[in-house]
Image (cartoon, helix red, strand yellow):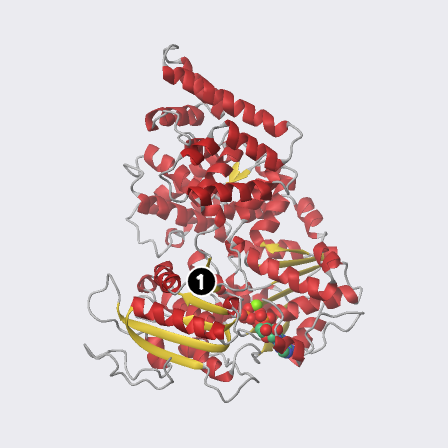
Amino acid sequence: MTFNSDELLAGFAPVQNNQNPLKGLNPGQLKAAETTEGPVVVLAGAGTGKTTTMVKRTAYIIQEGKAKASEILMVTFTRKAAGEMRSRLANILGPDVAQKITVGNFHAICADILRRHSGLVDLPQKFSILDNDGQKDVLGTIAIERGYISSRKDSAKISAFQEQISSWKEEGWDPEMVQKIAGEHPDRIVLEKLGMEPGFGTQAIKTYFEYQDMLAIRRWCDFSDLVLHVVRIFRAHDDVRQREASRFTHVVVDEFQDTSPVQNEWVRHMAKDHQNLCVVGDTDQSIYEWRNARPDIMMNFHKEWPNTTRVTIDINYRSTQEILDLANTVVAPLRLKDGLDKKLTSPRNGPEPKLFFKQYTSGLEEAESIARESEMLMEQGTKGSEIAVLCRSGMIINVIERGMRDRRIKYVVAGAMKFTDREEVKDAIAYLNLANNPMDFVSLERIVGKPRRGIGPQKIGEIRRVMISNKTDAVTAIEQVAKKMNARTVMHRTLLELAEFIKNAQNGIGQDENCGQILENLLEESGYFAWREGNDKDKMKTMRIENLERLISEAQEYNTVADFLESMALQAAADTQWDEDSVVLSTVHASKGLEFDVVFTPAMETGIFPNARAEQTSYGMDEERRLAHVAWTRPRNKLYTSFSLFRPGRNGTAEPSPYLVEAGFLSSTTTPKNSYGSSRIRRRAF
Ligand code: ATP
Ligand code: MG
């Protein structure tokens, strides 16, 4: 988010020469900003300036001398949001002061704390962070050994274990707690959405115990562990908690409606001594209940924190009234349940139409039309990065991409294929991980065939078993396996060479070399570079080499390999390169907190939006409404929404999303067959 002309008009230009940073705030915002001591909850709708107010409040606290920059902790939901918050702070306070404020998401802030006290949860200081694939790999190993699955191909069950365990971690439950709760309230432990067979809960608990043991031996922790471990340390060692908490006198949490119980507990530990805690959020934008977020944590904040100052704001500065009216309709049914009197209004309006709706015959036709319209808008002066196409699923993004490609329009896909998800980047990181953590068999398995060494799955399985059962590191395990073989075989020599390579790699980390150089050496000496360069059949060869070079140059900025690995592991959607000319294609989830001049929401069809899977849980359908509300509250000036009658993989004609009917675009949800154009369309088409 950059400062736009509206902000400048409202006196939102960078504050200089000690100007009052609160200038231009409305009374509700002012109350939130000026209440700098004690608990504050700001419950306010989309685009009402919550994030803006928090930034200005922080500037005010610093300028008034109520706290030093280094004493303020600001927690955001994603790294991208953290980066934006920091740049807004830098706009007001200057980069030097802004740099001293701790701004980050839960994972990054907790990883930092955990490094300092990892010994208290039996982790070495140099632990590695296990990513999604790594988690599945470890869980697959356990599930096979326990006989819960017969092959790694049963990925649905492995994912179910992964989801279940992450969900317990988000609740703040370690394995012992889950076991205890299972004894008392067996119905409380298994995720309703998984719908697994009876006995799944018991299997999952056993898997959880074993998974944590394996992580500890291998010096790993997963993402949810970052927060849970810190909370476990705080629960057991109040002196450590006090020391960590006392680094800050003021804590701010943005997007608080999507906080999980374990995150909330962490916030409580950090703020309970001084109570200067300000949380902001909007329950209408709670979209992570499937990941154990609990909007009621925000609703009950005042009960948890006595003497809370409550602030509500209902003026939306982002969008025009016409757009807001639409965004209000989709959450209107929720008002019947929560009884809240919430409706967004905007001071912004104008004679031009802001809302466009169209029905298409095919997804491709829809994509082409969006591409054409984007092109027109850009010709008229809208920047590409101010145009967003927000999709309910990645599948829809793929179709839109095709439309953009066909018209040669530059675009970026946010939150989809990340730099860190690319195969070659993962390989390079695995090399580095193995050098840094000798116990890391997931990384060993990843690199063993890259380049080809002739070590097949059976051999690698054997090495893995030795590592697990003897609790040894990779080098020892490989040497032990080699010892059992005929010393004259090629395999024997290959294994010893691999062991030698890993040993050297581990020694290399101890040398006084820069992290980029270490990585480059690893990729050269392993033959990985040469292998990639020699693969002429690979159409992506050039791009892969470029990515590896980019990775090496990023690594050069880090002093230690551990720091670099941590930073890579924590990279979320943040690493998408957003440049000014590229149209943004994104999932709705990844668009939270952002704003654009123009937004398209295609594929508003029953089954897609609301998503068919939403019906499997009690909260799913409400969450879909909130998700649509998030999408429709992103645009400042123009909103285009549409659906398509036909889509590959679907039989017959689509049923338009009920949200379109409720909004008054269509007269009923059932579109008569072969009736293209017969539905009553009230708004101007595009
Ligand atoms: P979301 O719910 O999407 O996270 P938010 O409540 O955090 O939104 P912001 O992103 O802070 O809202 O602000 C929305 C827009 O309104 C921004 O462009 C911001 O600059 C503008 N804005 C906020 N407060 C004011 C104000 N008092 N006067 C004019 N513009 C404002
Ligand atoms: Mg915000």
Q: Secondary structure at mark 1?
A: strand
Q: Residues within 10 Å of mark 1 (few under 14, many from 20)?
A: many
Quarter of the rendered structure image containing ligand 1: bottom right
As drawn, the residue found furthest toward the bottom would be 351
Q: Position of residue 178 (x, y in %)?
A: 44, 46
214 w.r.t. 99: above or below: above
Q: Amino acid at mark 1?
A: Ser
Query: Is the C-beta of the residue carrying label 1 under 8 Å from the nearest atom of ligand 1?
Result: no
| Residue at 49% in and 25% down | 473
The correct choice, above or below, for 575 with respect to 435 in the image is below
Q: Quadrant of residue 63?
A: bottom right
- Identify the residue at image location x=61%, y=61%: 84
| Quadrant occupied by the N terminus | bottom right
Residue 102: where, in percent of width, then height? 67, 55
Residue 221, image x, y percentages: 52, 41
- Where in the figure is residue 145, as x and y percent of width and height? 34, 32
Q: Which residue is mark 1?
A: 586
